[in-house]
Image (cartoon, rainbow, N blue to C red):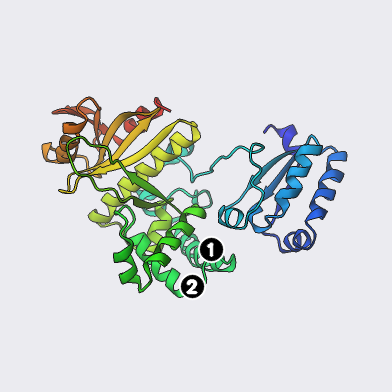
């Protein structure tokens, strides 16, 4: 929107208690106020946290059908809308996702080590480490735990808290509901429903397994990732100290998978992301499919030096897919070829995938 459009915009925040209860009591009040605002020159209506009052979507549809008003509807969860049978404006609305800041958006302000520890959520930018740590802890304690319970998404807050701790600890691992359930003291179906809550509230996402192979038996279970590294570390209670090498490796992989997902999403590319793993343990971190064709098989290493031993998973993958370009992405200062693979600095990798967006 340009400046003129912003001047002709009405913004409603349903986190404001007075606004929330006014429209909760009478959703029709929103429609009447919108029409009055339109007569005063308003052209755009921004309705934030719309999932808090699903009935407002009926008013939005009526206004779309009867007035020239245009709407931006934003929210942090689709669960209440879908499960409550809300009007999802089929055919009238475009779906878009807003992610934490990308490397490209932060530009010269981007710092890899800070992103691995504290993520790239907008409110944290420009803050010192102590302030960033406090905000992330508050986000986890207040929003993820209490807000999810307040919205009626879970009933057992203690069980959900134990589950969250494990979801963060095992981020990037293959989902094993039975094992997680035993560790958290929860039934398998409850663990499955909690992962659905995290997906519906946009806290996490699945990375499906690539399961097509003419030669090998492959793992079919998905992996699960948290949407931001800072949130992952806050849940795992590792914000206070510098990252150990094992944690750093997993967070480097998670960050670049997050960043890949964000870039393809913003480019509105017809792209799908997978991982690949055989029953014998050979694995590729990321398989990228664009327009129905595999464009890259990718292995991530959070160090500047790599060797032929780091190609074992990609080498196994090539036995099935010899024509697919293989990338080994690391923190090396420059690119070079290593056997059949191309070794890329992580920034160059992001530039490479953007060409396929």
Q: Position of residue 210 (x, y in %)?
A: 30, 40
Q: Residue furthest front?
A: 214
Closer mark to the observer between disc 1 and disc 2? 2
Residue marked by disc 1: 143
Q: Is residue 54 left or right of residue 109?
A: right
Q: Quadrant of the N terminus?
A: top right
At 16% from the left edge and 37% from the top edge, which residue is drawn? 316
Q: Is residue 10 left or right of residue 102?
A: right
Residue marked by disc 2: 157
Q: CA distance from mark 1 to mark 2?
A: 12 Å
Q: Position of residue 73 (x, y in %)?
A: 65, 45
Q: Position of residue 346 (x, y in %)?
A: 31, 36
**Quadrant in which residue 332 is drawn:** top left
Closest to the observer, 77 or 193: 193
**Badge 1: how crowded within 10 Å, few (<14), some, or many (20+)?**
few
Camera sees residue 123: yes
**68 in relation to 99, above or below:** above
Q: Quadrant of the C terminus?
A: top left
Camera sees residue 111: no
Check disc 2 and report its element: helix, strand or loop.
helix
At 66% from the left edge and 43% from the top edge, which residue is drawn? 89
At 18% from the left edge and 48% from the top edge, which residue is drawn? 279
Q: Reading the chain from its start, which is encountered first: label 1 or label 2? A: 1
Q: Position of residue 288 (x, y in %)?
A: 34, 34
């Amino acid at each position: 929107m340009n400046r003129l459009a912003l001047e002709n915009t009405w913004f409603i925040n349903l986190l404001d208690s007075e606004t929330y209860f006014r429209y909760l009591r009478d959703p029709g009040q929103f429609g009447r106020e919108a029409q009055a605002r339109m007569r005063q020159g308003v052209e755009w209506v921004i309705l934030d946290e719309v999932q808090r009052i699903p009935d407002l979507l009926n008013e939005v549809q009526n206004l779309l059908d009867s007035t020239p008003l245009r709407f931006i509807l934003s929210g942090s969860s689709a669960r209440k809308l879908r499960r409550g049978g809300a009007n999802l404006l089929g055919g009238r609305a475009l779906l878009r996702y807003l992610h934490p800041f990308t490397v490209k958006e932060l530009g010269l302000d981007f710092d890899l080590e800070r992103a691995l520890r504290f993520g790239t959520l907008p409110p944290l930018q420009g803050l010192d480490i102590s302030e960033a740590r406090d905000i992330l802890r508050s986000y986890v304690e207040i929003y993820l735990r209490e807000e999810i319970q307040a919205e009626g998404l879970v009933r057992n807050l203690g069980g959900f808290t134990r589950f969250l701790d494990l979801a963060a600890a095992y981020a990037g691992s293959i989902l094993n509901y039975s094992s997680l359930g035993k560790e958290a003291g929860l039934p398998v179906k409850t663990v499955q429903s909690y992962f659905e809550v995290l997906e519906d509230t946009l806290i996490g996402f699945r990375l499906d397994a690539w399961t097509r192979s003419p030669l090998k038996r492959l793992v079919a279970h998905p992996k699960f990732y948290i949407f931001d590294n800072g949130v992952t570390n806050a849940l795992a209670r590792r914000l206070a100290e510098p990252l150990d090498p094992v944690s750093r490796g997993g967070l480097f992989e998670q960050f670049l998978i997050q960043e890949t997902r964000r870039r393809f999403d913003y480019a509105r590319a017809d792209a799908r992301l997978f991982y690949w793993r055989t029953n014998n343990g050979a694995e590729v971190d990321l398989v990228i499919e664009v327009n129905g064709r595999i464009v890259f098989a990718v292995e991530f290493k959070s160090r500047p030096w790599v060797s032929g031993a780091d190609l074992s998973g990609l080498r196994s993958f090539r036995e099935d897919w010899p024509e697919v370009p293989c990338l080994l992405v690391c923190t090396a200062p420059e690119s070079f070829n290593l056997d059949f693979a191309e070794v890329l600095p992580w920034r160059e990798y992001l530039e490479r995938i953007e060409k396929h967006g």
